[in-house]
Image (tube, grey):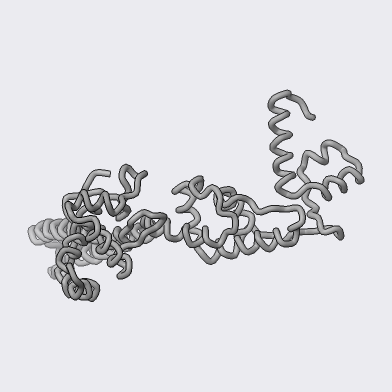
Amino acid sequence: MADVKWIKITTDIFDDEKILMIESMPSADSIIVIWLKLLTFAGKQNNDGVFLMSNRIAYTDEMLACIFRRDVNLVRLALKTFEQFGMIEIIEKVITIPNWNKHQTLDAYEKKKERDRLYQAERRAKQKLLVSGSPDESSDGQKTPSSDVAVSEEDIEKEKDIEREIKKNSASQPSKADVEAFFESVWELYPVKKGKGQVSETKRKALFKIGYDQMERAINRYLTELKKDASWRRPQNGSTFFNSGYVDYLDENFTPDQVTTGGRKENLPEWFGRRQLDEDEIAAVRRMMSEDDLAEAEQLRAELQASFGGNR
């Protein structure tokens, strides 16, 4: 992203309790300078407060020491202090500033609000000039109320609608750091931690919208089903579950298993019926194959049919 030319720093920054505590520490001034350098560097990167080089390589304390032209041990002390005070978060070894967008996009909102206010004020002033130049009169010679009153009320409502829309859009766009923190929390709930990097940023945002509580329920439902079939069924890799496996276990989709007296699911793919298997063969398939096995068999059958043609 292109770098920005300014960042927002409140005028009471040195009254903040975290800064006050830092000022009581050794090397306080140097640590505060590093904090300001970190903020300006985040603005220059313009990457939602996430310190990544080319969106791939995490900045290390040695790299920041070089960029800030400060001793590496001092930078390490500063980063440790900032993390303890919640000024930064380290997620998967990546340094982030929590709620960066919340604090740094507020000026953009205020600027738009002021621009809209000035536009409406100029528009109303022009209308007043038109009205004052040719006032309407009723049949008894009295002036009728200016339509500008109604227009002003309408404009005020439009301004409020703009503000609500801005707030709505801002709330619907979580920061990258928030999405990553959420994904870390649900990833910890899942037992097979394989393929984490295969869950894309888009998928992680989709999981964020679903919410922690529902994802926790989905994971618990899946694990409960696995326990019932522990002798022949194994959990999916984390990448498989969080990319698609969780869908069947969401509140709106989940249906408890229908089982036979033997404890096996009744589900069979449609193509088994077309094969006209007899009852013994179908029963044998139920005993030998899990739901995941059947899905794989269905996929294999489709691939074979695509390769060789015809119904096999």
Q: Does residue 241 appear to the left or right of 197 in the view shown? A: right
Tell me residue 155's x, y (percent).
24, 62
For the image shown, how many numbered marks are present on the structure? 0
In the rendered structure, the answer to whether residue 286 lies left or right of residue 22 reads right
Q: Is residue 133 left or right of residue 27?
A: left
**Where residue 226 appears, x then y in whole percent?**
70, 58
Q: Is residue 154 visible?
A: no
Q: Pick the residue in front: 134 or 16.
A: 16
Left or right, 41 with respect to 204, comes to: left
> Looking at this view, is 19 or 148 the one in front?
19
Rendering coords of residue 164 (x, y %): 32, 63
- Residue 75 visible in the picture: yes
| Most foreground residue, 3 or 135 | 3
Q: Residue furthest top?
A: 308
Q: Quadrant of the C terminus?
A: top right
Residue in front for this viewpoint, 78 or 46:
78
Kindly identify the residue that appears in the image at 73 percent across and 24 percent down: 309
Check the image and report above or below for 156 versus 239.
Answer: below
Q: Residue at x 51, y 59 (%)?
A: 210
Q: Position of residue 46 (x, y in %)?
A: 26, 50
Point out the image quarter for the N terminus.
top left
At x 38%, y 55%, the residue is 93
Residue drawn where x is 73% and y is 34% of the image: 301
